[in-house]
Image: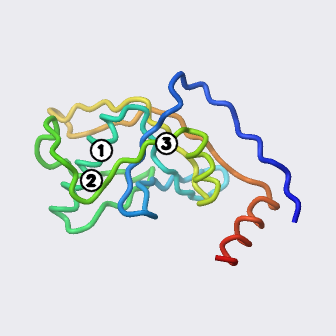
Amino acid sequence: MVSVPMVLPKTNFEDNKVHTIHHGKNSAFTLQIYNEKTQISKSSIIAFKQLEDSYKTAYILEKHKLVNKEYPILHSNNALINLYGNYDEIINLKELEIKTWNYNDLLLYSLDNYLNILTVFEITDDTDKTFKMNFKGKLHSIEGDHTFYSQVLNNLYLK
């Protein structure tokens, strides 16, 4: 099979590094985002520009699991995580880990795993008043053509 080399989009990031949260080798922190126009939900991997933001979020996810006995399933229309305790002083993560990526490598990972990328540039919170955290970022919709996904599925079949 002959394949055409894939052209990766250029990024505007001065620093091309992003950080993602993982639980084990094949489990990444994702958010289900619903597109009202197409009426389709697609998972998006959350990529943090700031390492500190990825650790803060991972810590909150671990605290949520400690209290609720499971990690939250997040949807764009229902992205609620209970905040437990003070996360200003983050201790070592027990179950989750942070992976640092070159953005283009994360793009390839996302293509292979049918994921979009939600790049978080900043987290703002007013936990003193409303216990909310807001992610400010950009959604990168990633789709390959039919030939690309045929090749991905063939590779999976051969493994």
Name the residue that disc number 1 marks.
57
Amino acid marked by disc 3 = Trp
The way the protein has been coloured in the rendering is rainbow
In-image side of 25 versus 9 (left or right): left
> Pointer 3 and pointer 1: residues touching (CB < 8 Å)?
no
Residue lying at 26% horizontally and 39% vertically, measured from the top left: 132
Amino acid marked by disc 1 = Thr
Residue 13 falls in image quadrant: top right
> Pointer 2 and pointer 1: residues touching (CB < 8 Å)?
yes
Q: Where is residue 17 in the image (x, y as percent from the top left)?
A: 49, 34
Given residues 23 and 78, the one toward you in this image is 23
Say which element carries label 3: strand
Disc ID at residue 61: 2
Amino acid marked by disc 2 = Leu
The residue lying furthest to the left in this view is 85
Residue lying at 46% horizontally and 64% vertically, measured from the top left: 26
Task: Report the mark closest to the observer, 3 or 1.
Answer: 3
Residue lying at 28% horizontally and 42% vertically, measured from the top left: 55
Q: Distance between the residues labelled 3 and 1?
A: 17 Å
Q: How far apart are marks 2 and 1 (CA)?
A: 6 Å
Q: Which quadrant, please, contains the C terminus?
A: bottom right
Q: Where is residue 44 in the image (x, y as percent from the top left)?
A: 52, 51
In-image side of 104 versus 126 (left or right): right
Disc ID at residue 101: 3
> Mark 2, residues whose alpha carbon is within 10 Å: few (<14), some, or many (≥20)?
many
Given residues 153 and 76, the one toward you in this image is 153
Q: Where is residue 78 in the image (x, y as percent from the top left)?
A: 38, 53
